[in-house]
Amino acid sequence: MPRLKERGLKTKGELSDNLCMGRKALPLVLERSRMALQQFLQDDHKTGHFPLPRYRMEEMLLVLSLLRDLEVHPDFELPSKSDLLKNTRHPKRHLLLLFPLLCDCITIAEPSIKTTLREIFHNLSRLFGLG
């Protein structure tokens, strides 16, 4: 029978170390994501009808893609006072913390950002058992 290491799986000690690091990093990742979304929305509003530089669009697409793909461990607590977030263990529950900002992003004209947002909202609908 192959050992955990031979199959590329973590040993129990390594797994608990990764969980500990993830638990500490999650609030920082979510706060940095919130700040990036807010700044992008402010800059997009300031430019009016003129598009933001391509590198800013790519940065926002990366942030949204990483948020879309992120799955939070069920034992991790999210930095929120919301009972809804405290009572769910869904791996995509972090998207609820950023929901108002994600909604504001729907005004962005960039097609790739709209596609990623659509995927995020589909994840949220599955979280609520709607899709």
Image (tube, helix red, strand yellow):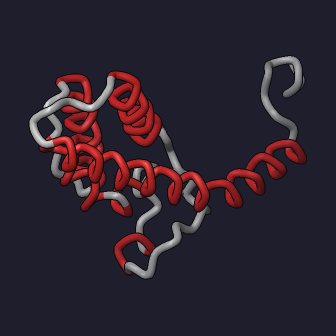
Residue drawn at x 44%, y 81% as measured from the top left: 81
Count how many numbered circles sit on residues in the image.
Answer: 0
Q: Where in the figure is residue 65, as x and y percent of width and height? A: 40, 32
> Which quarter shows the C terminus?
top left
Which part of the image, by quadrant, shows the N terminus? top right
Kindly identify the residue that appears in the image at 24 percent across and 38 percent down: 117
Query: Residue at horizontal 17%, vertical 38%?
Result: 108
From what the image shows, is residue 28 above or below residue 2? below
Looking at the image, which is closer to me, 130 or 64?
Answer: 64
Q: Is residue 91 above or below residue 98?
A: above
Asked whether, in this view, residue 107 is left or right of residue 36, the answer is left
* Along the viewing direction, whichever of 9 and 45 lies nearer the viewer: 45
Q: Is residue 1 visible?
A: no
Relative image position of residue 124 (x, y in whole percent): 27, 50
Is residue 66 at least partly visible in the picture? yes
Look at 34% across and 60% down and name the residue there: 96
| Left or right placement of residue 121 versus residue 87 in this view | left
Q: Quadrant of residue 60?
A: top left
Q: Nearer the viewer, residue 76 or 106?
A: 106
Residue 78 left/right relative to 81: right
* Residue 9 occupies quadrant: top right
6 in relation to 27, above or below: above
